[in-house]
Amino acid sequence: MILTGFLSQTASAELVALRQELHRRPELSSQERETAARIVAELKRCRPDEILSDLGTHGVAAVYDSGVEGPTVLFRCELDGLPITEISTFGWRSEIDGKGHLCGHDGHMAIVVGLARQLAENQPARGRVVLLFQPAEETGAGAADVINDPRFDRIRPDFAFALHNLPGLPLGAVGVRSGPFTFASEGLAISLSGRTSHAAQPEAGLSPASIMGRLMEALPALPETLGHASGHSLVTLSHARLGEAAFGISPGEADIWVTVRAIDDRLQAELMGEAEMLAGRLAEAGGLGVTFDRYENFAAGHNDAEAVDKIEAAATKLGASRVEVGDPFRWSEDFGRFGSVAKTGLFVLGSGEDHPRLHNPDFDFPDELIGPGVAMFEAITRDICGGQPPAEG
């Protein structure tokens, strides 16, 4: 069943137009100045009690305050696009070369603006509702930047909710589970340094080739080597470079990049530490220098049981179709960071079983999901903060 929520035909059309406008003008992580300004302009039409701008770089938060004691509930969406060239032929395809909204953040923003429209018509009866448009989700930096902004204390939530569209699931189907939901992840770049020599005299140099080869085998096998439970961690080789592209030089340096993932933050920290120690031991044994750099640190996403109850109650109330989420997703979501400050609930909303996958160059957010997304967030809002939804248009 595809939900329509409480949106009038006019409101639905306006939200689709907004989504497609945002799709045309994607901005990369931490560069979302134009997108944030467009969102602020849209929110002003929805009469929040307060708008906070430039949270943790370009974040935007709209606050609807009932003036009555009660919980603060935050709904989060994302501002950023991806550094991928879009190949779609839609009239609203990206107008910026090499950049595209190919994860659906444009649609997530339209859904949260839709919730703002609902709250403008009927504010919460108790507590506060905070609508957060977060920067830099794709790099894992944005949530931490927002939380570390001194103004975040003014909107610190008791509950935080988010959704992510997910191709491969039936259109509009809701999927959620308590406990681990998305993996922690971080990029580890390992640089090995030896000494170049003439290719005719490799013995005169110190090539990192053999150590590089051993690491390329040992790092992906590390979860098994450490005895981690099957499916709880993963090390993926993502990039490797040895020396220069020249026939006359025996290489003196090498780079290996891996992405490290785990089901929780404790196991993630252990795996990252072990990967560095393994590379350090092998480099020392081979007489090589070694340095490490870390990138794109995502916390594991853990769904609070009470927050999940609210999501499931909303789906039941609305008659939404459901899909079982048996195991945590191995992809990462920066929303996991909000678990350090609130009871969090992230759920997936199906984008269609045959829909192009996230980050594919032909992905486009299905506009049919805007209504279901608004309906789910609206139902959660009224469950926790009360108030009646506007009459269906």
Image: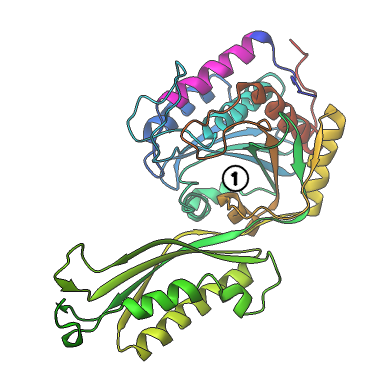
Side of 110 relative to 317 (left or right): left
Residue 125: image location, x then y, percent: 77, 31
Q: Label 1 neighbourhood size at 10 Å, few (<14), some (14-19), many (20+)?
A: many
Residue 122 figure quarter: top right
- Magenta includes 126? no
In the rendered view, tell whether residue 245 sits above or below residue 99: below
Quadrant for the N terminus in the image: top right
Residue 48 shows up from this direction:
no
Report the front residue among 78 and 169: 169
Residue indicated by mark 1? 155
Residue 90, position in %: x, y?
A: 47, 18
Residue 110, x across and y down, in percent: 57, 26
In this rendering, would 298 be left or right of 69? left
Q: Quadrant of residue 239?
A: bottom left
Location of the C terminus (image quadrant): top right
Residue 190, by quadrant, is bottom left
Q: Given the current orientation, which residue lies at the most extreme front position?
A: 200
Residue plotted at (83% across, 45% down)? 309
Q: Nearer the viewer, residue 120 or 252?
A: 252
Q: Give, as a single range, the part of the protein colored magenta.
A: 10-24
Question: Taken as a whole, is the magenta stretch helix, strand or loop?
Answer: helix
Residue at figure coordinates x 59%, y 49% from the top left: 335
Residue occupying the point 39% across, 44% down:
30
Instruction: Name the colouring of the figure.
Output: rainbow
Instruction: State the residue at coordinates (46%, 20%).
Output: 21
Residue 13 lies within the magenta run = yes
Q: Is residue 174 above or below residue 152?
A: above
Label 1 SS: helix
List x then y, in percent, for residue 73. 69, 42
Q: Could you tell me the amino acid type at mark 1?
A: Ile
